Image (spheres, rainbow, N blue to C red):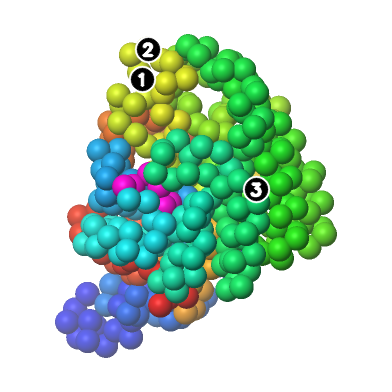
Amino acid sequence: MSEEQNTAAAFDLVIRGQRVLTSAGIAPREVAVKDGRVVAMEPLGNGLVGAETIELADDETLIPGLVDTHVHINEPGRTDWEGFASATRAAAAGGVTTVIDMPLNSIPPTTNVENLALKRSVAENQAFVDVGFWGGAIPGNTGDLRPLHDAGVFGFKSFLLHSGVDEFPHLEAEELETDLAELRKFDSLMLVHAEDSHAIDRAPHAEGDIYAKFLASRPRGAENKAIAEVIERTRWTGARAHILHLSSSDALPMIASAKRDGVNLTVETCPHYLTLNAEEIPNGATAYKCCPPIREASNRELLWKGLEEGTIDCIVSDHSPSTLDLKDLENGDFAVAWGGVSSLQLGLSLIWTEARHRGIPLEKVVSWMSTRPAEIARVPNKGLIAVGYDADFSIFAADDAFVVDVKKLRHKNPITPYDGRALSGVVRKTYLRGQVADGTQPIGKLIRRGGI
């Protein structure tokens, strides 16, 4: 482009092509960006002029950057598990342009304003995509919830059983109700890890390398009972609640019933529950261990149905990495290994690979993985390609394919249950506010509720 054309350019960037995912579906469009925002969208051929122009290839679709609201970055304190630089590089490589960090497993956890400030100071200048933060709700910190909200957290995470780390204790149901009532006062969101501790205490113990024993130790009933508790406490308080990482399809009818009753409830599930099944998990394969667990193929099919019917609202990664040692790879003991699946970079391709076989269009996948998470967390200006929104995009080649090589993934520790898996859909380029997010420059911002 000549210097004269550069001077005359009305926009910083124009991307045009036959396949642009707009709020009205995929259509031929030109998208213009200025100062990091989408400022114009026109039919293809209108000749918008940018200082830089990108022409999409015939096999490429421009989609909004994904919004992953369930990521454990673990820094500070457990940075050998993951960190802001490695996690956000992995996110960018997978077309994820916004992540919201969970309040554990960092040390200290994000349970008061001082700890939030520490986490932000560590994340500063290490973010390759935009990063927001959840607060934590633990016994005794009800008084910290409003200050954390005012400091910009997007909501609060709680557990109804041991969290896996001692510095983030769980709430009893009565404590959850107290905190829900507190959050109702300022219309914040309570995220709940819903497994019932009493039911799990009475379940068979997980021991050794047999996956079936581990699965029996985290029964559906424990999840169902806890979800029922969350529904009723949310109903009584009038608060907003969100069920994390749904794995039990048994809970879908009562979730649907609660939503019909007007209970302010949303629900997420994760790629591992939608793409893997218990029958195919090898004994000793602790890369597959997560809580709640990956269940049977029949359960997986019902989760897909729950998504299509709208009972489940969105899909997020629950990227919960650890060191290789903590996965107990040498012994493969499911009772000992850390529970968590690493998939932050792979989510879009994982879900698209399954969805296309089921006749589910790309538009629906993006809604589940970008638009709806942004809406639920109330992340401003994210989740759509639309005028006024941040220019967060990914160029996605839906018909391209690749084989997962764990050594080439950008998260810190080279383990994932998807190693060697053939997937459809390749993220060819990611843009954050109109800039290429390729992991070379930390161009991400630390974002806050309401954009404050």
Residue holding disc 2: 331
Q: Quadrant of residue 199?
A: top right
Q: Quadrant of residue 25?
A: bottom right
Horizontal arrangement in the rendering, residue 25 relative to residue 36 (left or right): right
* Image quarter of the C terminus: bottom left
Asked if 106 appears above or below 20 in the picture, the reply is: above
Q: Which residues are magenta?
A: 98-107
Amino acid type, mark 3: Ala
Predominant secondary structure, magenta span: loop
User: In the image as oriented, which residue stretches furthest toward the front?
Assistant: 140
Secondary structure, mark 3, is: helix
Residue holding disc 1: 328
Can you give x and y, in whole percent of width and height, for residue 297 in the image? 66, 26
Can you give x and y, in whole percent of width and height, for residue 70 in the image? 47, 50
User: Marks 1 and 3, Cα distance to the nearest angstrom?
Assistant: 33 Å
Q: Residues within 10 Å of mark 2 (few under 14, many from 20)?
A: some
User: Marks 1 and 2, Cα distance to the nearest angstrom?
Assistant: 6 Å
Tell me whether circle 1 and circle 2 mark residues in contact (CB < 8 Å): yes
Amino acid type, mark 2: Asn
Residue holding disc 3: 173
